Image: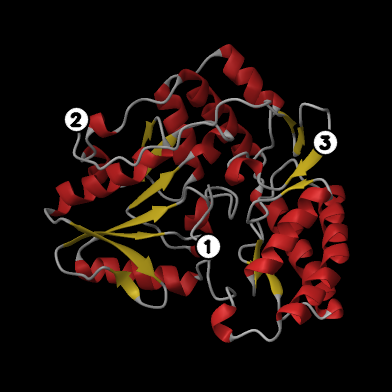
Amino acid sequence: MGRAAFIPAPPAPKGGPRLRALGCRLWDADGAMRIDFDMAGGSALLGHSQPVVESAIADGAPAAGVVEAALADLLPGSCAVRFCAEESQALPAAIDAARRATGRRRAAVWDAGVGPFGGVDDLAAIVVDPLGAEPHDLAAVRRAADAAGAVLIFDEGVSSFRVHENGAQGLGGVSPDLAVFGSALANGRSIGAVCGRSDLIFALDPEDLPAPSTPSLAAAGATLKLLAVDPVAPRLRVLGAELQAEIARLAELAGADGLFTLDGDPSLPTPLFARPQIEGLWLRGMAGRGFVVVGPHALSAAHGEPEVAALIAAYAALLPTFVEEGRRLGPTRRADFAFDIRPEGHA
Protein backbone atom coordinates (compact mmCIF):
# COMPACT_ATOMS: atom_id res chain seq x y z
CA MET A 1 0.00 0.00 0.00
CA GLY A 2 1.27 3.48 -0.83
CA ARG A 3 1.98 6.07 1.83
CA ALA A 4 -0.59 8.65 0.76
CA ALA A 5 -3.33 9.37 3.28
CA PHE A 6 -6.47 8.66 1.29
CA ILE A 7 -9.65 10.58 2.04
CA PRO A 8 -12.57 8.22 1.45
CA ALA A 9 -15.44 9.49 -0.65
CA PRO A 10 -18.81 9.66 1.14
CA PRO A 11 -21.12 6.71 0.47
CA ALA A 12 -23.74 7.15 -2.22
CA PRO A 13 -27.27 7.64 -0.88
CA LYS A 14 -29.42 4.51 -0.90
CA GLY A 15 -33.13 4.27 -1.45
CA GLY A 16 -35.53 6.85 -2.81
CA PRO A 17 -36.36 7.61 -6.43
CA ARG A 18 -33.57 8.12 -8.95
CA LEU A 19 -33.85 11.41 -10.82
CA ARG A 20 -33.78 11.51 -14.60
CA ALA A 21 -31.24 14.05 -15.79
CA LEU A 22 -30.66 15.60 -19.17
CA GLY A 23 -28.73 18.76 -19.99
CA CYS A 24 -29.35 21.13 -17.09
CA ARG A 25 -32.71 19.65 -16.10
CA LEU A 26 -33.79 17.05 -13.56
CA TRP A 27 -37.08 15.18 -13.30
CA ASP A 28 -38.34 13.57 -10.11
CA ALA A 29 -40.41 10.42 -9.77
CA ASP A 30 -43.62 12.40 -10.30
CA GLY A 31 -42.35 13.92 -13.53
CA ALA A 32 -41.80 17.41 -12.07
CA MET A 33 -38.94 19.22 -13.82
CA ARG A 34 -36.34 21.41 -12.14
CA ILE A 35 -33.52 23.49 -13.59
CA ASP A 36 -30.25 22.32 -12.10
CA PHE A 37 -27.73 24.94 -11.01
CA ASP A 38 -25.71 22.47 -8.93
CA MET A 39 -24.70 20.11 -11.77
CA ALA A 40 -23.26 17.36 -9.56
CA GLY A 41 -21.24 19.89 -7.61
CA GLY A 42 -20.13 21.59 -10.82
CA SER A 43 -18.57 18.44 -12.27
CA ALA A 44 -21.17 17.87 -15.03
CA LEU A 45 -19.43 20.52 -17.10
CA LEU A 46 -21.00 19.49 -20.41
CA GLY A 47 -24.46 18.82 -18.97
CA HIS A 48 -26.12 15.67 -17.69
CA SER A 49 -26.25 12.65 -20.02
CA GLN A 50 -24.26 14.40 -22.75
CA PRO A 51 -24.86 12.26 -25.88
CA VAL A 52 -21.25 12.05 -27.10
CA VAL A 53 -20.03 11.11 -23.63
CA GLU A 54 -22.75 8.51 -23.15
CA SER A 55 -21.99 7.00 -26.56
CA ALA A 56 -18.29 6.76 -25.69
CA ILE A 57 -19.13 4.94 -22.46
CA ALA A 58 -21.18 2.42 -24.42
CA ASP A 59 -18.28 1.90 -26.85
CA GLY A 60 -15.70 1.23 -24.12
CA ALA A 61 -12.61 3.08 -22.97
CA PRO A 62 -9.64 3.94 -25.17
CA ALA A 63 -6.15 3.17 -23.91
CA ALA A 64 -5.24 5.09 -20.76
CA GLY A 65 -2.25 6.64 -22.55
CA VAL A 66 -4.52 8.18 -25.18
CA VAL A 67 -6.66 9.86 -22.52
CA GLU A 68 -3.58 10.99 -20.58
CA ALA A 69 -2.25 12.64 -23.75
CA ALA A 70 -5.61 14.35 -24.34
CA LEU A 71 -5.46 15.92 -20.87
CA ALA A 72 -1.81 16.94 -21.28
CA ASP A 73 -2.67 18.66 -24.58
CA LEU A 74 -5.17 20.93 -22.82
CA LEU A 75 -2.68 22.14 -20.21
CA PRO A 76 0.01 24.80 -20.76
CA GLY A 77 3.56 23.63 -21.35
CA SER A 78 4.72 20.05 -21.26
CA CYS A 79 3.45 17.77 -18.53
CA ALA A 80 2.99 14.14 -17.64
CA VAL A 81 -0.36 12.73 -16.47
CA ARG A 82 -1.55 9.86 -14.30
CA PHE A 83 -5.18 8.95 -13.62
CA CYS A 84 -6.72 7.39 -10.54
CA ALA A 85 -10.14 6.12 -9.53
CA GLU A 86 -11.25 8.98 -7.27
CA GLU A 87 -10.60 12.71 -7.03
CA SER A 88 -9.97 12.25 -3.30
CA GLN A 89 -6.96 10.04 -4.08
CA ALA A 90 -5.20 12.54 -6.36
CA LEU A 91 -4.20 15.26 -3.89
CA PRO A 92 -2.80 12.95 -1.18
CA ALA A 93 -0.82 11.12 -3.86
CA ALA A 94 0.55 14.41 -5.21
CA ILE A 95 1.61 15.55 -1.73
CA ASP A 96 3.30 12.21 -1.10
CA ALA A 97 5.21 12.55 -4.38
CA ALA A 98 6.38 16.00 -3.25
CA ARG A 99 7.61 14.46 -0.01
CA ARG A 100 9.56 11.81 -1.88
CA ALA A 101 11.09 14.37 -4.24
CA THR A 102 12.08 16.89 -1.56
CA GLY A 103 12.86 14.59 1.36
CA ARG A 104 10.63 16.79 3.55
CA ARG A 105 7.36 16.08 5.32
CA ARG A 106 5.14 19.13 5.74
CA ALA A 107 2.46 20.36 3.36
CA ALA A 108 0.89 23.81 3.76
CA VAL A 109 -2.32 25.30 2.39
CA TRP A 110 -1.91 28.77 0.88
CA ASP A 111 -4.06 31.65 2.11
CA ALA A 112 -3.79 34.72 -0.13
CA GLY A 113 -3.88 37.10 2.82
CA VAL A 114 -1.56 35.18 5.11
CA GLY A 115 0.74 32.93 3.11
CA PRO A 116 1.34 29.24 3.75
CA PHE A 117 -0.94 28.23 6.60
CA GLY A 118 0.90 25.79 8.82
CA GLY A 119 4.39 27.24 8.76
CA VAL A 120 7.31 26.85 6.39
CA ASP A 121 9.74 24.56 8.22
CA ASP A 122 10.44 21.22 6.54
CA LEU A 123 8.06 22.26 3.75
CA ALA A 124 7.56 19.73 0.95
CA ALA A 125 4.51 21.23 -0.77
CA ILE A 126 2.26 24.28 -0.89
CA VAL A 127 -1.30 23.54 -1.97
CA VAL A 128 -3.50 26.28 -3.42
CA ASP A 129 -7.08 26.31 -4.67
CA PRO A 130 -6.80 28.68 -7.65
CA LEU A 131 -10.55 29.27 -7.99
CA GLY A 132 -11.14 33.00 -7.75
CA ALA A 133 -7.51 33.79 -6.95
CA GLU A 134 -6.02 36.87 -8.59
CA PRO A 135 -3.01 36.43 -10.90
CA HIS A 136 -0.81 38.35 -8.46
CA ASP A 137 -1.82 35.91 -5.69
CA LEU A 138 -0.80 32.95 -7.83
CA ALA A 139 2.47 34.66 -8.74
CA ALA A 140 3.11 35.26 -5.03
CA VAL A 141 2.55 31.62 -4.12
CA ARG A 142 4.83 30.58 -7.00
CA ARG A 143 7.58 32.79 -5.57
CA ALA A 144 7.00 31.46 -2.07
CA ALA A 145 7.23 27.85 -3.23
CA ASP A 146 10.43 28.56 -5.15
CA ALA A 147 11.98 30.38 -2.19
CA ALA A 148 11.14 27.50 0.15
CA GLY A 149 12.23 24.83 -2.32
CA ALA A 150 8.73 23.37 -2.08
CA VAL A 151 6.49 21.80 -4.72
CA LEU A 152 3.58 24.03 -5.78
CA ILE A 153 0.34 22.05 -6.20
CA PHE A 154 -2.85 23.47 -7.72
CA ASP A 155 -6.04 21.74 -6.58
CA GLU A 156 -8.17 22.15 -9.70
CA GLY A 157 -10.94 19.82 -8.63
CA VAL A 158 -13.43 22.68 -8.91
CA SER A 159 -11.77 25.22 -11.23
CA SER A 160 -10.73 22.62 -13.83
CA PHE A 161 -11.67 23.72 -17.37
CA ARG A 162 -14.60 25.91 -16.33
CA VAL A 163 -12.49 29.00 -15.51
CA HIS A 164 -10.27 28.82 -18.59
CA GLU A 165 -9.84 26.52 -21.58
CA ASN A 166 -6.37 25.60 -20.24
CA GLY A 167 -7.43 25.36 -16.61
CA ALA A 168 -6.60 27.91 -13.92
CA GLN A 169 -2.99 27.68 -15.10
CA GLY A 170 -4.01 29.36 -18.35
CA LEU A 171 -6.09 32.00 -16.62
CA GLY A 172 -3.37 33.16 -14.24
CA GLY A 173 -0.31 32.49 -16.37
CA VAL A 174 1.32 30.72 -13.42
CA SER A 175 2.33 27.08 -13.79
CA PRO A 176 2.34 24.79 -10.75
CA ASP A 177 4.69 21.86 -10.37
CA LEU A 178 1.72 19.53 -10.00
CA ALA A 179 -2.02 19.95 -10.53
CA VAL A 180 -4.80 17.61 -9.48
CA PHE A 181 -8.16 17.27 -11.21
CA GLY A 182 -11.39 15.44 -10.49
CA SER A 183 -14.67 14.26 -11.89
CA ALA A 184 -15.17 17.29 -14.16
CA LEU A 185 -12.68 15.53 -16.46
CA ALA A 186 -15.28 12.79 -16.97
CA ASN A 187 -18.37 15.05 -16.96
CA GLY A 188 -19.33 14.02 -13.46
CA ARG A 189 -18.17 10.41 -13.33
CA SER A 190 -15.69 9.43 -10.66
CA ILE A 191 -12.06 9.96 -11.69
CA GLY A 192 -8.93 11.78 -10.53
CA ALA A 193 -5.74 12.92 -12.21
CA VAL A 194 -2.30 14.18 -11.22
CA CYS A 195 -0.49 16.26 -13.86
CA GLY A 196 2.84 18.06 -13.89
CA ARG A 197 6.59 17.75 -14.01
CA SER A 198 7.70 14.35 -15.23
CA ASP A 199 10.15 13.85 -12.33
CA LEU A 200 7.33 14.40 -9.82
CA ILE A 201 4.93 12.17 -11.74
CA PHE A 202 7.68 9.51 -11.70
CA ALA A 203 7.83 9.92 -7.90
CA LEU A 204 4.15 8.95 -7.53
CA ASP A 205 3.54 5.61 -5.87
CA PRO A 206 1.44 3.48 -8.27
CA GLU A 207 -0.28 1.91 -5.27
CA ASP A 208 -1.65 5.34 -4.37
CA LEU A 209 -3.34 5.58 -7.78
CA PRO A 210 -5.80 2.74 -8.39
CA ALA A 211 -7.01 2.72 -12.00
CA PRO A 212 -10.27 4.47 -12.88
CA SER A 213 -13.22 2.38 -13.98
CA THR A 214 -13.69 1.69 -17.68
CA PRO A 215 -16.83 3.90 -17.93
CA SER A 216 -15.04 6.77 -16.20
CA LEU A 217 -12.01 6.54 -18.45
CA ALA A 218 -14.25 6.43 -21.52
CA ALA A 219 -16.19 9.45 -20.26
CA ALA A 220 -12.95 11.32 -19.63
CA GLY A 221 -11.70 10.57 -23.14
CA ALA A 222 -14.88 11.92 -24.71
CA THR A 223 -15.10 14.94 -22.39
CA LEU A 224 -11.52 16.00 -23.05
CA LYS A 225 -11.97 15.54 -26.80
CA LEU A 226 -15.05 17.79 -26.75
CA LEU A 227 -13.31 20.43 -24.63
CA ALA A 228 -10.38 20.48 -27.06
CA VAL A 229 -12.57 21.42 -30.04
CA ASP A 230 -15.22 23.49 -28.24
CA PRO A 231 -14.07 24.94 -24.88
CA VAL A 232 -16.92 25.84 -22.58
CA ALA A 233 -15.03 28.33 -20.38
CA PRO A 234 -15.53 31.41 -22.62
CA ARG A 235 -19.31 30.88 -22.73
CA LEU A 236 -19.53 30.29 -18.99
CA ARG A 237 -17.62 33.51 -18.29
CA VAL A 238 -20.07 35.51 -20.41
CA LEU A 239 -23.19 33.92 -18.93
CA GLY A 240 -21.88 34.23 -15.38
CA ALA A 241 -20.85 37.86 -15.82
CA GLU A 242 -24.32 38.69 -17.18
CA LEU A 243 -25.93 36.93 -14.22
CA GLN A 244 -23.76 38.70 -11.65
CA ALA A 245 -24.25 42.14 -13.20
CA GLU A 246 -28.02 41.82 -13.42
CA ILE A 247 -28.38 40.42 -9.90
CA ALA A 248 -26.21 43.23 -8.54
CA ARG A 249 -28.46 45.77 -10.28
CA LEU A 250 -31.64 44.15 -8.95
CA ALA A 251 -30.23 43.86 -5.43
CA GLU A 252 -29.33 47.55 -5.38
CA LEU A 253 -32.78 48.52 -6.65
CA ALA A 254 -34.46 46.38 -3.99
CA GLY A 255 -32.16 47.65 -1.22
CA ALA A 256 -30.87 44.13 -0.64
CA ASP A 257 -27.24 44.76 -1.60
CA GLY A 258 -26.27 45.03 2.08
CA LEU A 259 -27.73 41.61 2.76
CA PHE A 260 -26.78 39.56 -0.27
CA THR A 261 -24.26 39.43 -3.09
CA LEU A 262 -23.45 37.07 -5.95
CA ASP A 263 -19.68 36.85 -5.79
CA GLY A 264 -16.82 34.72 -7.07
CA ASP A 265 -15.64 33.50 -10.44
CA PRO A 266 -18.19 34.19 -13.21
CA SER A 267 -18.27 30.50 -14.16
CA LEU A 268 -19.32 29.65 -10.60
CA PRO A 269 -21.18 32.66 -9.11
CA THR A 270 -21.55 32.15 -5.38
CA PRO A 271 -24.44 33.57 -3.30
CA LEU A 272 -23.20 35.10 -0.03
CA PHE A 273 -25.56 36.18 2.73
CA ALA A 274 -25.33 38.51 5.70
CA ARG A 275 -27.57 36.28 7.81
CA PRO A 276 -28.24 32.52 7.78
CA GLN A 277 -31.97 33.25 7.97
CA ILE A 278 -31.78 35.00 4.59
CA GLU A 279 -29.91 32.04 3.14
CA GLY A 280 -32.78 29.85 4.38
CA LEU A 281 -35.27 32.09 2.56
CA TRP A 282 -33.18 31.76 -0.58
CA LEU A 283 -33.03 27.97 -0.42
CA ARG A 284 -36.77 27.60 0.14
CA GLY A 285 -37.65 30.22 -2.44
CA MET A 286 -35.48 28.72 -5.16
CA ALA A 287 -36.74 25.20 -4.50
CA GLY A 288 -40.32 26.44 -4.64
CA ARG A 289 -39.65 28.03 -8.03
CA GLY A 290 -38.26 24.87 -9.57
CA PHE A 291 -34.50 25.30 -9.18
CA VAL A 292 -31.86 22.98 -7.79
CA VAL A 293 -29.42 25.15 -5.84
CA VAL A 294 -27.07 24.12 -3.06
CA GLY A 295 -24.40 26.82 -3.02
CA PRO A 296 -22.49 28.19 -6.00
CA HIS A 297 -24.40 28.40 -9.29
CA ALA A 298 -22.48 25.83 -11.35
CA LEU A 299 -22.96 26.94 -14.93
CA SER A 300 -22.40 24.34 -17.65
CA ALA A 301 -22.42 23.98 -21.42
CA ALA A 302 -26.08 22.97 -21.11
CA HIS A 303 -27.10 26.33 -19.62
CA GLY A 304 -28.03 29.20 -21.86
CA GLU A 305 -29.78 32.56 -21.86
CA PRO A 306 -33.27 31.08 -21.10
CA GLU A 307 -32.08 29.32 -17.95
CA VAL A 308 -30.13 32.34 -16.74
CA ALA A 309 -33.14 34.59 -17.44
CA ALA A 310 -35.35 32.25 -15.40
CA LEU A 311 -32.88 32.39 -12.50
CA ILE A 312 -32.75 36.19 -12.68
CA ALA A 313 -36.58 36.31 -12.57
CA ALA A 314 -36.53 34.14 -9.45
CA TYR A 315 -34.06 36.50 -7.78
CA ALA A 316 -36.21 39.49 -8.73
CA ALA A 317 -39.10 37.90 -6.86
CA LEU A 318 -37.02 36.90 -3.83
CA LEU A 319 -34.92 40.01 -3.22
CA PRO A 320 -37.79 42.02 -1.63
CA THR A 321 -38.30 39.16 0.85
CA PHE A 322 -34.62 39.42 1.79
CA VAL A 323 -35.18 43.10 2.62
CA GLU A 324 -38.26 42.30 4.72
CA GLU A 325 -36.37 39.63 6.63
CA GLY A 326 -33.44 42.01 7.13
CA ARG A 327 -35.77 44.60 8.68
CA ARG A 328 -37.25 41.96 10.96
CA LEU A 329 -33.82 40.80 12.12
CA GLY A 330 -32.51 44.30 12.72
CA PRO A 331 -29.09 45.83 12.01
CA THR A 332 -26.28 43.52 11.05
CA ARG A 333 -22.80 43.59 12.52
CA ARG A 334 -19.74 43.27 10.34
CA ALA A 335 -19.03 39.94 12.05
CA ASP A 336 -22.32 38.61 10.63
CA PHE A 337 -21.21 39.04 7.03
CA ALA A 338 -19.83 36.22 4.90
CA PHE A 339 -18.94 38.55 2.03
CA ASP A 340 -15.18 38.28 2.47
CA ILE A 341 -15.15 34.48 2.50
CA ARG A 342 -14.07 32.88 -0.77
CA PRO A 343 -15.49 29.37 -0.98
CA GLU A 344 -12.87 26.64 -1.16
CA GLY A 345 -15.08 24.64 -3.50
CA HIS A 346 -18.27 22.47 -3.20
CA ALA A 347 -19.07 18.84 -3.30
User: The residue tagged with tag 3: helix, strand or loop?
Assistant: strand
The quadrant of the picture occupied by the N terminus is: top left
The residue wearing badge 2 is: 1
Above or below 136: residue 181: above
Percent of width and height locating residue 297:
68, 54
Question: What residue type is disc 1 on?
Answer: Pro
What x and y, as percent, mark residue 330? 71, 84
Q: Nearer the viewer, residue 253 or 334?
A: 334
Horizontally, is 115 left or right of 130 in the view? left
- Picture disc at residue 33: 3
Identify the residue at horizontal 83%, vertical 69% (top origin). 321
Mark linked to residue 156: none
Upstream in the sequence, badge 2 or badge 3?
Answer: 2
Q: Are marks 1 and 2 in contact (CB under 8 Å)?
A: no
- Within 10 Å of disc 1 (Cα), the crowding (few <14, some 14-19, many 20+) is some
**Left or right relative to 166: residue 92:** left
Query: In 3D space, how far apart are the residues under numbered discs 1 and 2 (Cα atoms)?
Result: 33 Å
Report whether residue 191 is seen: yes
Q: Quadrant of residue 329?
A: bottom right
Residue at horizontal 36 percent and vertical 25 percent from the top: 211
Question: What crowding class fits label 3: few (fewer than 14 Cα within 10 Å), some (14-19), or many (20 or more)?
Answer: some
- SS assignment at label 2: loop
Q: Is residue 121 left or right of residue 347?
A: left
Near-viewer residue (90 or 20): 20
How are the colours assigned in the image?
A: secondary structure
Q: At label 2, which amino acid type do we have?
A: Met
Q: What is the CA distance from the residue labelled 3 to the residue labelled 1?
A: 29 Å
Q: Nearer the viewer, residue 209 or 344?
A: 344
Give the residue pinned by disc 1: 343
Residue 55: image location, x then y, percent: 65, 18
N-terminal of the pair, mark 1 or mark 2, is 2
